[in-house]
Amino acid sequence: MLEIMELFGNKAFLALIFISAIAIFLVLREVFCWYYKINKIVDVLERNEQIQKETNRLLQELNNKS
């Protein structure tokens, strides 16, 4: 038990655990986003936003000409 306590007292060991936790979080986040197609949904929403802006601009031009 004392050996485990000594490991957690070592700053290099704690840094390794911290970096490993961040890496695992990033990998799992990417898997989660892939599984639920969140990245594709964001792409579609961004394209819709661009189309909406272009439509609004064209409608504004038509409205100004009248």
Image (spheres, rainbow, N blue to C red):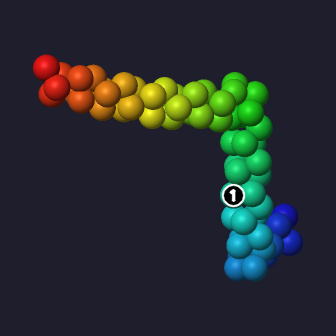
Q: Quadrant of the N terminus?
A: bottom right
Where residue 46 appears, as percent x and y from the top left, is 51, 34
Location of residue 21 with respect to 44 vertically, above or below:
below
| Residue 2 left/right relative to 22 | right
Q: As rendered, which of 5 and 60 lies closer to the eye?
A: 60
Q: As rendered, which of 10 and 54 lies closer to the eye?
A: 54
Residue drawn at point x = 77 percent, y = 70 percent: 16
| Residue 48 left/right relative to 7 | left
Residue drawn at point x = 74 percent, y = 33 percent: 34
Q: Give amino acid for label 1.
A: Ile
Residue 2 visible in this rendered orientation of the protein? no
> Helix, strand, or loop for circle 1?
helix
Where residue 41 appears, as percent x and y from the top left, is 60, 27
Location of residue 12 with respect to 39 vertically, above or below:
below
- Total marks in image: 1
Q: Quadrant of the C terminus?
A: top left
* Residue named by callout 1: 22
Where residue 4 appears, as percent x and y from the top left, is 82, 67
Where residue 9 appears, as percent x and y from the top left, is 71, 76
| Residue 36 left/right relative to 4 | left
Residue drawn at point x = 75 percent, y = 79 percent: 12
